[in-house]
Image: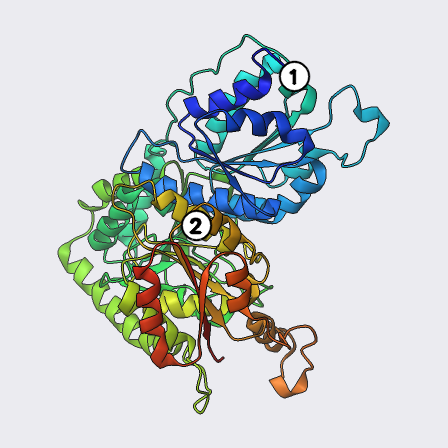
Amino acid sequence: MTAGYTGADLFADALESYGVDYVFGNPGTTELPIIESIGTSDLEYILGLHEDIAVGMASGYAQTRRYHAHHDESITPVGVANLHIAPGLAHGLGNLYAAKITGAPLVVTAGNHSTDFRHEEPILSGELVGMAEQFCKWSDEVLDVAALPTMLRRAFRVAMTPPTGPVFLGLPLDVMLAETDAEPERLGPIPNAGGGDPAQLERAADLLAEAENPVLVVGDHVARSGADAVAAAVDLAEATGARVHGEILSSEVDFPTDHDQWVSYIPPNEDLARTLLDTDTVVFAGCSTNTTLTRHEEALVDSETTCIHLSDDDWQVGKNQPADAAIVGDPGLILQGLLERVRERISDATVEERLEHVDAVKAMAEPKLSEMGTGDAEDDPRASKAELVDAMERVAGDAYVVDEGITSKYAMLARWDLAPEQYISNKGGGLGYGLPASVGAAIAESQRDDPRDVVGFIGDGSYLYYPHAIYSAARHGVDLTVVISDNRNYRILKDNTLKLMGGTEDDYAFTGIDFEPAVDFVQNAQSHGARAERVESPDGIERALEDALAREGVDVLDVLVHD
């Protein structure tokens, strides 16, 4: 037994000094010194039964704590996950990818074999740094305990510095067992991305003044920048008379959806996206996923359209469309800087003219939006996705929602007036993020003085990836309600089959797409420690959800829906 102060002890002490409360993980032999040090610290270890669950929980936790940190500077909004060597890291890559796309500030670590033993190629060996680096802002390994304090400090700073995202550190067994007299290094303040190039701000203001019918497309980097950034987007829209949309595959609320100038999220449909982006001037504010799932035949934005790009991520600026004004910096500060400049350039009369056009586009779009999720199964006793979403909004309108509803997503986005800091979703598209992220989000909410109800809105296909995430929630006493939108098939794949290859559903066998026989979600959830109930008709949704929200602990509602 090691009697002295070790690298593992320093690791745990550094996390505590940086304001970390939880480590999400799945343990293995190479992580045992870390697990022991965590166990004797004030940190709480949240067990995931699969490494990808641990990463997903840490990511949902980090996304939610980032909102909390916007209002409390003492909060360190970082999720920490500890995985088990090469296969464990490989297991976690799906949600590490999701964390990258959603910009979750994560510090992901994994144990590794001792540095003087790897030449024998023991089991579980692998090249950890290379495996993780494509999904991380920084990926490295600590090869000497003397480097541990600096590399840990750097990991936290890189994860939290805009644009935020995950980092990876390998922690070899001999480094964690090595004795040291080092101490954690102070973290220091995290800078924002700045207010942007004044010359480009002036140019953007001129272009907005000259526009006929400007469109503001808000992306998730706006919400990540804080409540002030969302407020600045509202102020800029009002000052310019711009029509407002959310980027394709938005995963956060970047603009209040009950605002008069808000029209819709842009769907990942080429024709609809092109229609909504068909104007003379578009401002892309903090966007990162604004394109379709598969190739589009024509450009989503006309080559003659004037484009203004702003983001804290320089890679996104001018990426898919030429930028006539390009501004790199904090989206909130840039939007505020634009607001100050356009006020003196745009008259009230011009704003009124533009708002008339906004009203006309809203009137055109509303019938299409109201149809989302209604389906065409008139004689089916199950709820439509629209009926499910409407019932959820009536009962849990103020709840914090973690969404991986996939084909139910746009019914929720079109029908529910979601407020900023109320909603996160799976931005990356790979299934298996939403349920673990719901658990992490609920843990984060429990740290607030006045926690919100947390509802995980999960498609049946998504739920089946990691149903054992429910065990982590039950084991650790998490208060969480999960609503499964259960149509018993991978509906997105049927829809995409028709888009890619044409024809009707009768033309295809849809091999491997239907869940026949169906999985019993109720028994499954109960086996992992949750209360569970199947809801087979629209009439039962509100009562079941009210009961679930009124109880402490984990509830799973399997709501049957039709397509």
- Residue 71 disc label: none
- Residue at 32 percent of width and 72 percent of height: 542
Question: Seen in the image, is 399 located left or right of residue 62?
Answer: left
Please give the residue where the numbered disc 2 appears in the rendered image: 287
Circle 2: residue type = Cys
Q: Residues within 10 Å of mark 1 (few under 14, many from 20)?
A: few
Circle 1 sits in a helix, a strand or a loop, which is it? loop
Circle 2 sits in a helix, a strand or a loop, which is it? loop
Can the viewer see residue 211?
yes
Question: Seen in the image, is 402 located left or right of residue 361?
Answer: right
- Residue at 38 percent of width and 36 percent of height: 329
110 in relation to 205, above or below: above
230 in relation to 304, above or below: above
- Which is more N-terminal, label 1 or label 2? 1
- Residue at 21 percent of width and 68 percent of height: 356
Question: Seen in the image, is 168 located left or right of residue 419?
Answer: right
Q: Residues within 10 Å of mark 2 (few under 14, many from 20)?
A: many
Can the viewer see residue 390?
no
Circle 1: residue type = Met
Question: Quick one: which residue is furthest to the right in this view?
Answer: 120
Please give the residue where the numbered disc 1 appears in the rendered image: 1
